């Protein structure tokens, strides 16, 4: 007898709805209900959040080193690899910029009332004070202080500090590049270790996501109970709309435009060729799980040579997370708006830098984007506990942004193939 397994996204949505219902019910009980939510419900959400934060550092180290070392021979793949990295980084920065422009224009956090915002500010008063003090000391250190801070003097100290994720990313990238440059026989032992470590971390993420419905329910119930107002729901709806508009802009405007300019292919050709992979990515929320279908669509549907697709697409599944990066930018600014953090130009540039670098180490599995969001929040000094605001609606948005991630991989593969003379659109098989 087969066991019925409910898809994770339905579990998350069920947890969200249950949390909303429980939160509204508890809110109706007054102060006693709020105290009950704080003492007996919110701790389960905190445990879930802490487990996600626990995996952030090892995930970055393992997946980033694995991804970079997978480039193998730099001299042989320098032409293709250089172009691939350039386009992946460019589209990622473009995606984050679009997200930041939209979230600053739509201001989803402004739908939170002053009373609700003050409640949050009181809740995170200590963190706000630390943020102000840290910003003041940063200004006193000089304009190149962020560049100096990028290079750690002690890796283990950086790994033990929640605010030094950029240092961890820097070390991991340097480590991965060094693995490519040493003898393959010696490097393979280390690469195998990090491949195994990466697999273990991904399995740990699977285990953590098993309790995601309970964590989401607890976080949402406590959130609604502690601030029982419709403005939160309106703000979440506006936030979700902002993310979707940004993702649609990338999928239906930016990518087709890039393909038209660099590969002389039409919008309809791109969308029709990649549609099966988009649908699978939407349903699985995993670029890695979609990779075989993506490769088939890109080679048969878009006419990309198999040699190009076999290199560009696996690298893209590891380091190209345009949709996830856009979401991180929007979510970070939204959370900062709700918590009353005033983000200046320097903070938003930090978001672009951190989200771009973090996307390189973002695992191509459901829920990994949340870990990357925590990294971005800590980089700009926003309390990562604010992730509770967006966690309930993360799964539907995860489905959308994964489809954009896969579309970005296919777009870059098409552009690289066209530049190398390995694009043969007339050879695609009829479906």
Image (cartoon, helix red, strand yellow):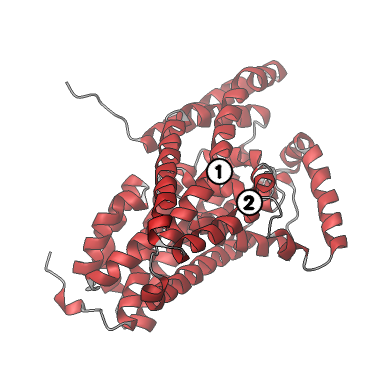
Residue contact at pointers 1 and 2, CB within 8 angstroms: yes
**Figure check: 354 above or below 114:** below
The residue indicated by pointer 1 is 56
Residue 269: give x, y in percent of width and height.
26, 73
How many numbered tags mark residues here? 2
Residue lying at 67% horizontally and 32% vertically, measured from the top left:
227
Which part of the image, by quadrant, shows the N terminus?
top left
Local packing at callout 1 (Cα closer than 10 Å; few below 14, some 14-19, many 20+) is many
> Sequence-wise, which precedes: disc 1 or disc 2?
1
SS for dot 2: helix
**Figure check: 151 above or below 216:** below
Residue 308: give x, y in percent of width and height.
29, 71
Q: Decide which of 118, 87 is in the foreground and name it.
A: 87
* Label 1 – label 2 distance at C-alpha: 9 Å
SS for dot 1: helix
Q: Is 159 on the left or on the right of 343, as rendered?
A: left
Q: Is 6 on the left or on the right of 160, as rendered?
A: left
Which part of the image, by quadrant, shows the C terminus?
bottom left
Residue lying at 57% horizontally and 21% vertically, measured from the top left:
25
The residue indicated by pointer 2 is 165
Residue lying at 42% horizontally and 71% vertically, measured from the top left:
74
- The answer, for residue 319, to whether it is visible in the render is no
Q: Is 398 on the left or on the right of 431, as rendered?
A: right
Q: Decide which of 70, 181 is in the foreground and name it.
A: 181
Residue 146: give x, y in percent of width and height.
73, 62
């Amino acid at each position: 007898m087969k066991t019925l397994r409910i898809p994770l996204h339905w579990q998350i949505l069920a947890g969200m709805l249950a949390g909303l219902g429980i939160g509204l019910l508890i809110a109706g009980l007054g102060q006693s209900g709020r105290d009950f939510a704080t003492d007996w419900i919110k701790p389960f959400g905190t445990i879930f959040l802490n487990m996600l934060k626990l995996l952030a550092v090892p995930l970055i180290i393992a997946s980033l080193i694995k991804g970079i070392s997978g480039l193998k021979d730099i001299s042989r793949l320098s032409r293709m690899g250089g172009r691939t990295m350039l386009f992946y980084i460019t589209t990622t920065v473009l995606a984050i910029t679009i997200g930041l422009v939209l979230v600053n224009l739509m201001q989803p956090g402004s739908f939170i009332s002053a009373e609700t915002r003050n409640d949050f500010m009181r809740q995170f008063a200590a963190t706000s004070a630390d943020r102000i003090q840290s910003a003041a000391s940063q200004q006193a250190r000089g304009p190149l202080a962020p560049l100096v801070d990028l290079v750690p003097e002690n890796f283990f100290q950086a790994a033990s500090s929640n605010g030094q994720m950029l240092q961890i990313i820097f070390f991991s990238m340097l480590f991965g590049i060094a693995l490519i440059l040493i003898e393959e026989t010696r490097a393979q032992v280390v690469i195998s270790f990090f491949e195994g470590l990466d697999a273990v971390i991904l399995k740990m993420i699977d285990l953590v996501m098993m309790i995601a419905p309970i964590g989401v329910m607890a976080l949402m119930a406590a959130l609604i109970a502690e601030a029982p107002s419709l403005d939160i729901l309106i703000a979440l709806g506006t936030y979700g709309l902002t993310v979707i508009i940004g993702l649609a802009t990338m999928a239906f405007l930016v990518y087709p435009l890039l393909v038209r300019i660099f590969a002389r292919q039409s919008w309809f050709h791109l969308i029709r060729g990649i549609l099966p992979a988009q649908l699978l990515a939407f349903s699985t929320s995993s670029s890695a799980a979609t990779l075989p279908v993506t490769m088939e669509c890109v080679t048969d549907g878009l006419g990309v040579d198999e040699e190009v697709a076999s290199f560009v697409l696996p690298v893209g599944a590891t380091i190209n997370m345009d949709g996830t990066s856009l979401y991180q930018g929007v979510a970070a600014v939204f959370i900062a708006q709700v918590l009353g953090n005033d983000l200046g130009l320097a903070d938003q540039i930090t978001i672009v830098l951190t989200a771009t670098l973090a996307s390189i180490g973002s695992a191509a599995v459901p829920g990994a984007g949340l870990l990357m969001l925590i990294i971005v929040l800590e980089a700009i000094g926003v309390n990562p506990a604010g992730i509770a605001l967006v966690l309930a609606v993360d799964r539907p948005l995860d489905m959308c942004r994964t489809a954009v991630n896969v579309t970005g991989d296919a777009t870059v593969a098409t552009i690289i193939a066209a530049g190398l003379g390995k694009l043969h659109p007339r050879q695609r098989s009829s479906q």
